[in-house]
């Protein structure tokens, strides 16, 4: 069965990324790329990527959501200045919001772990095989993805023809 035939009913973003990365397990490939870029950036600063980088990013994002919801709830109440100050003082300060790369990686990690759980629960061996193949062939798929992204960034051929 072809790759696109297996994706019947998937949204455009899912289909597009599957074509670009060459596998339905594209989140794994993209996550590897993001982590590799972040690892290089941190090595340039003389630091290392923490082993819990992804879960730490998720926790920081969740803490900001909880904090924002608590503030929104308080703002909806009739203002009682003394009570407001006491409640606001009790709210824990969220950790600093992680960088853009960490947020992207954490979101991909959350989606990938949900897909993995879903595949394990329903017994989707095809998706698990695709993930295993993506892990085994990570380097070749990464190269294919970078060439596909380069193709997306260059102008279409008909525009090149008219530019000459």
Image (spheres, helix red, strand yellow):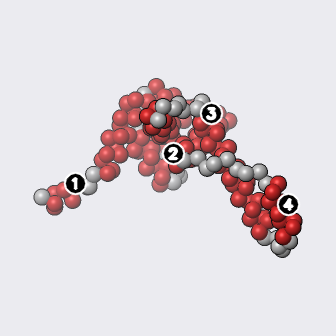
Residue 86, numbered label:
4
Q: Quadrant of the N terminus?
A: top left
Q: CA distance from mark 4 to mark 1?
A: 64 Å
Q: CA distance from mark 2 to mark 1?
A: 32 Å
Q: CA distance from mark 3 to mark 2?
A: 15 Å
Which is in the foreground here, disc 2 or disc 1? 2
Q: Which residue is mark 3?
A: 52
- Kindly state the secondary structure of the residue where label 3 is placed: loop
Q: Residue at x 32, y 41 (%)?
A: 147
Name the side, left or right, on which 7 lies relative to 51: left
- Kindly state the secondary structure of the residue where label 1 is placed: helix
Q: Residue at x 26, y 55 (%)?
A: 155
Q: CA distance from mark 3 to mark 4?
A: 34 Å
**Residue 51: x %, y % from top left:** 60, 30
Q: Which residue is mark 2?
A: 101
Chain-order first, disc 3 or disc 2:
3
Name the side, left or right, on which 13 lies relative to 161: right
Give the image quarter of residue 140: top left
Chain-order first, disc 3 or disc 4:
3
Q: Are marks 3 and 4 in contact (CB under 8 Å)?
A: no
**Residue 139: x %, y % from top left:** 40, 29
Rendered view: 38 above or below 77: above
Q: CA distance from mark 1 to mark 3?
A: 44 Å
Residue 157, numbered label:
1
- Kindly state the secondary structure of the residue where label 4 is placed: helix
**Residue 10: x %, y % from top left:** 52, 51
Q: Residues within 10 Å of mark 1 (few under 14, many from 20)?
A: few
Chain-order first, disc 2 or disc 1:
2
């Amino acid at each position: 069965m072809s790759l696109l035939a297996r994706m019947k009913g998937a949204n455009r973003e899912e289909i597009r990324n599957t074509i670009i990365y060459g596998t339905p397990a594209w989140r794994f490939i993209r996550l590897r790329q993001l982590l590799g870029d972040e690892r290089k950036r941190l090595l340039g600063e003389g630091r290392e990527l923490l082993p819990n980088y992804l879960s730490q990013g998720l926790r920081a994002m969740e803490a900001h959501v909880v904090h924002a919801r608590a503030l929104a709830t308080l703002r909806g109440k009739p203002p009682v200045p003394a009570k407001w100050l006491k409640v606001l003082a009790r709210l824990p300060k969220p950790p600093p919001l992680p960088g853009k790369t960490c947020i992207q990686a954490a979101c991909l990690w959350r989606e990938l772990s949900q897909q993995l759980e879903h595949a394990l629960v329903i017994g989707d061996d095809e998706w698990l095989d695709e993930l295993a193949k993506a892990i085994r062939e990570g380097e070749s798929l990464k190269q294919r993805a970078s060439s596909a992204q380069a193709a997306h960034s260059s102008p279409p051929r008909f525009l090149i023809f008219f530019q000459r």
